[in-house]
Image: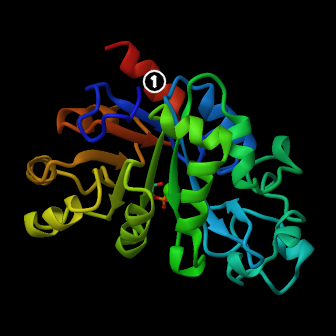
Amino acid sequence: PVLADSPKHNGETILIGHRGAAGVAPENTISAIETGSRSGAGFVEIDIQLSADGVPFIFHDDTPARTSNVAEVFPGRENDPITSFTWDELQRLDVGSYFSEQFVGEKIPHFDDVADALTGETGVFIEIKSPAKSPGVEQVVADYLKTDPQWSALEAGGKIEVLSFDAASNKRFAALAPEVPLQQLLGSVPSATELEEIASYADSFGTSYRTLDAAGAERVKNAGLGLGVYTVNSVQAAQASLELGVERLTGDFPAQIHRHLKGQ
Ligand code: G3P
Ligand code: CA
């Protein structure tokens, strides 16, 4: 699948490996991105933030406590903002051992590493995570998509979508790179009026599949927006979402959902 004609894409279901493939490898690591890239899903999703010295890195949480060995390496800094660490400090963290022994030594990826880890035709959903804590991140992503050969080839091939829960960040990104498909995330579907406002800068809308019902899905479609859901980790959830007209399915076990979709 490609997103070049988003939101009126080619009608195929778009499957996205969440944080790479967070159910089978440590989230947002090269292992997870490689696994997601080989899963049959067309895309992997990653979360991007900026380090204290301005380096774009891949990480979901606001602090290093849950997914790293920060307590060993930087005792006392477990609950510090992840964006308060410099790139060199981030590189000293192990973000694999929280998941299993198999992944001990896994490092936080640089944004550049993501493009290198993709196989075949895989595209990337770039979530701008907690942008208020990474000032300037929209410009960094837009610059990569415009000037970096690997990223601009992905963008030109319809293999990129940018997304955020933060509407102000999305509007900043839309102004910088209006040609890039953009998704507004929210925990549930808002009113038709709010969706109309979202449609003024975004191409699609993403929410939790748990909060989505037929009326909500219809409001999104009526606003002319594409529709995505997270985090779809069972074939039942995938099936229910498809029946509501969802075309972007993001989940931690993309190979499993891919097998289900192929079997249809
Ligand atoms: O694709 C959207 C999804 O990733 C949003 O939730 O918290 O996993 O970033 P979160
Ligand atoms: Ca995310």
Residue underneath mark 1: 258
Quadrant housing the N terminus: top left
Residue 161 relative to residue 212: left or right: right
235 over 174 or under it: above or below: above
62 over 103 or under it: above or below: below
Q: Residue furthest front?
A: 147
Residue 234 relative to residue 88: left or right: left
Q: Residue furthest top?
A: 263
Q: Position of residue 86 (x, y in %)?
A: 81, 75
Q: What's the residue at 69%, 77% (across, down)?
A: 83
The chosen color scheme is rainbow
Q: Position of residue 2 (x, y in %)?
A: 41, 29
Q: What is the total number of numbered labels drawn onto the structure image?
A: 1
Quadrant housing the C terminus: top left
Classed neighbour count for the residue bearing mark 1: other residues with Cα under 10 Å, few (<14), some (14–19), many (≥20): some
Q: Residue furthest bottom?
A: 76
> 230 or 24: nearer the eye?
230
150 over 169 or under it: above or below: above
> 239 or 46: nearer the eye?
46
Name the secondary structure under disc 1. Answer: helix
Q: What's the residue at 61%, 64% (across, down)?
A: 140
261 over 44 or under it: above or below: above
Residue type at mark 1?
A: His
Q: Quadrant of residue 193?
A: bottom left
Q: Position of residue 76 (x, y in %)?
A: 83, 87
Q: Quadrant of residue 172?
A: bottom left
Residue 7 relative to residue 61: left or right: left
Q: What's the residue at 44%, 57% (across, down)?
A: 177
Q: Position of residue 162 (x, y in %)?
A: 45, 53
> 116 or 5: nearer the eye?
5
Q: What's the residue at 66%, 38% (across, down)?
A: 150
Q: Quadrant of residue 80?
A: bottom right
